[in-house]
């Protein structure tokens, strides 16, 4: 069980994207769900709207993040806002025992 969190700049724009990919085996995902799946939240200040209103949220279950093939992508107007969001996410995942993959 692990995750990666990177910050990328969208080509040709001032928008920065936090890309969070959680890697869970099927057994780990089941165990996480049965033990009370944890939610990860992120700051909404500076979040860029998406074309899909279902994705405009401020938190998500870890198992839900892991189930997304491309991971979770959160778009921010500025790099500092994206860096703050990534730091908040890293702290939360560390607190629930999920380690960042290097």
Image: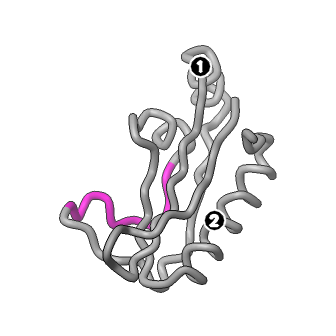
**Is 16 situated above or below 19?**
below
Q: Which circle's residue, 2 or 1, is located before the other in the chain?
A: 1
Q: Position of residue 2 (x, y in %)?
A: 69, 35
Which element carries disc 2, helix, strand or loop? helix
Q: Nearer the viewer, residue 79 or 48?
A: 79
**Residue at position x 73%, y 39% in the image:** 101
**Residue at position x 71%, y 50% in the image:** 93
Tell me if label 2 and label 1 are in contact, CB under 8 Å.
no
Q: Position of residue 19 (x, y in %)?
A: 50, 55
Query: Which numbered tag is attached to residue 43?
Result: none
Q: Where does the C terminus fall, quadrant-wise?
A: top right
Crowd rating for badge 1 (residues with CA inside 10 Å; few <14, some 14–19, many 20+): few
**Is 91 situated above or below 93?**
below
Query: Which numbered tag is attached to residue 25?
Result: 1
Residue 59 falls within the magenta-colored stretch: yes
Looking at the image, how many numbered discs can be counted on the residues? 2
**Is 55 situated above or below 48?**
above
Q: Gap between marks 2 and 1, in whole Å?
A: 23 Å
Locate residue 101 relative to residue 68 in the image: left or right.
right
- Residue at the extreme front of the image, as rendered: 12
Locate residue 90 relative to residue 43 in the image: left or right.
right
Q: Position of residue 31 (x, y in %)?
A: 65, 22
Q: Nearer the viewer, residue 32 or 51?
A: 51
- Residue for badge 2: 86
Residue 33 falls within the magenta-colored stretch: no
**Residue at position x 59%, y 56% in the image:** 6
Q: Nearer the viewer, residue 76 or 11?
A: 11
Locate residue 30 relative to residue 2 in the image: left or right.
left
Which residues fall within the magenta stretch? 52-60
């Amino acid at each position: 069980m692990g995750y990666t969190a990177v910050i990328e700049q969208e080509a040709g724009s001032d928008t920065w994207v936090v890309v969070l990919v959680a890697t869970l085996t099927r057994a780990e995902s089941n165990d996480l769900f049965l033990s009370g799946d944890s939610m990860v939240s992120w700051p909404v200040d500076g979040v860029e709207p998406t074309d899909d209103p279902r994705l405009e949220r401020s938190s998500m279950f870890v198992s839900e993040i892991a189930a997304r093939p491309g991971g979770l992508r959160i778009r921010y107007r500025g790099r500092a806002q994206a860096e703050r969001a990534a730091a908040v996410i890293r702290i939360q995942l560390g607190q629930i025992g999920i380690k960042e993959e290097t």
